[in-house]
Amino acid sequence: MTITFHLNGEEVTLPQVASTATLLDWLREERGLKGTKEGCNEGDCGACTVMVTDDGGSKSLNSCLLFLPQLNGKSVRTVEGAAGPDGELHPVQDAMIEHHGSQCGFCTPGFVMSMVAAHKNGATDHDDQLAGNLCRCTGYAPIIRAAEAVEEQPVPVWIENEGGDLPAPADAGAFSPRSGNELAKVYADNPDAVLVAGATDVALWVTKGLRQLDPVIFLDGCADLKEIEITDDRVRLGAMVDMNRMRDAVAPLHASYGEMIRRYASQPVRNAATVGGNIANGSPIGDNPPALIALGATLHLRKGDTRRELPIEDFFIAYGKQDREPGEFVEAVSFPRQTDVFRSYKISKRFDQDISAVCGCFNVIVENGAVTDARIAFGGMAATPKRAAHVEAALLGKAWDLASVKTAMGEFAKDFSPLTDMRASAEYRLQTAAALLERYYADVNGEEVSVLEISA
């Protein structure tokens, strides 16, 4: 397929682009732009970070997880383009020098580009903005000081104007549909195709698994699948809503959910990863599905002109198997508005950006002191994200007190037979799941439960 995009202010047209060629490889091997580094090649280290701008704004993204066709009609800035056309350094580059933010320098281009994007967007939550960039020798304190030093400095004109004149996207063909309707037709005609949303998982099939993917359908052009609708009684998220936009939408409604989203990926990964991709992936350790199950979410599926809905917990049939027909795709997910008694607890060896050993999500409705509804779901406890049906049954109709909670805690072994693996033993998982129910009871009753708020 043919694509057109801007690279450091220059329009580039590439005919016959391979559908799974990554931006990282192309920059280094075809354009000789070696500032963008290859570290982990899986989106963990941030050495390959670039800034990508489209009509939704500018984002930091991992170039190792970007297929070239995803850039059609967009603008890319690498570290070579952070400086101005006359060689004038970007303020964050000056600050990195002034505050000694670099030693060996391998990670520095990625840090700089994350900081360039954050500075352009006026973001000052530096710990979050830079959490996806790893440094092994300098230490983060001088880098954070550099980011803080430029907060009040103006955005350079060459960065401020980025995105003001986006190139017209080349006609990339049928496998880059521009709407959900086009996608439905193309996918129905090519049910064996691989759907690429944010590519944060699919790219690893290529870079790590060395798989040959053909054909590939790129979904980024489907603007209608990026819509968010929040009414008085329901929240609906299109399948192509990225996880940062989802976080912004759900955090005011369920603060615990927003914090969980912040923890489970870095800023560049959340900028790319999508709601629909996370669900359709079907991972038993994905953190989003247990939360959506606990919130009573409905999954909206489409095949051709036929649409259907099902409770999201029914979508996950067995490990690696979902209730999705060939040619059928996730169109959206929705869940009802409610009083915020929802809590999500992510248990992992590393606090930020780690795969959960256990992810427990709780949503217990209490009226007149008794439990009238309970939805409790876990990831990391079974071959699929799964509700704790016996635990829920033990709570329903009972007084909402510690005695009832203690009784229900004994039911977890009936719901789950977890595995032992590198992240946790089966015994640990069961004990932790039960303890999280007690933590939830304390949490919604106003007790301090945060492990980050400990005092002697």
Image (cartoon, rainbow, N blue to C red):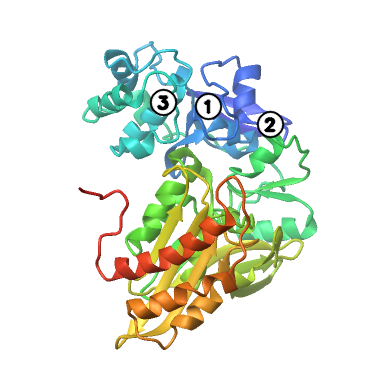
The residue lying at 78 percent from left, 43 percent from top is 214
Q: Secondary structure at mark 2?
A: loop
- The residue identified by callout 3 is 111
* Image marks 2 and 3: residues in contact by CB distance under 8 Å: no
Q: Residues within 10 Å of mark 2 (few under 14, many from 20)?
A: some
Q: Quadrant of residue 112?
A: top left
- Which is nearer the N-term, disc 2 or disc 3? 2
Amino acid, disc 2: Ala
User: Looking at the rendered structure, which numbered label has been put on residue 21?
Assistant: 2
Q: Which numbered dot is residue 397?
A: none
Q: Earlier in the sequence, mark 3 or mark 1?
A: 1
In the rendered image, the quadrant that contains the N terminus is: top right
In the shown orientation, is residue 5 left or right of residue 445? right
Q: Please tell me whether residue 409 is drawn above or below residue 166 in the rendered image.
A: below
Mark 3 residue type: Phe
Secondary element at tag 3: helix
Contact between labelled residues 1 and 3, with CB atoms less than 8 Å apart: no
The amino acid type found where label 1 is placed reads Cys
Q: Residue at x 59, y 36 (%)?
A: 65
- In space, the residues marked 2 and 1 are separated at their CA atoms by 15 Å
Q: Give x and y (percent) for residue 205.
A: 70, 40
Q: Nearer the viewer, mark 2 or mark 1?
A: 1
> In x, y percent, where is residue 246?
44, 55
Under tag 1, what secondary structure? loop
Numbered circles on residues, count? 3
In this view, the residue in front, 106 or 455, is 455
Image position, residue 144 (x, y; %): 30, 28
Q: Which mark is residue 48?
A: 1
**Real-space Cα separation, disc 3 to disc 1, in angstroms:** 9 Å
The answer to which of 452 and 119 lies nearer the viewer is 452
Q: Is residue 110 in view from this perspective?
A: yes
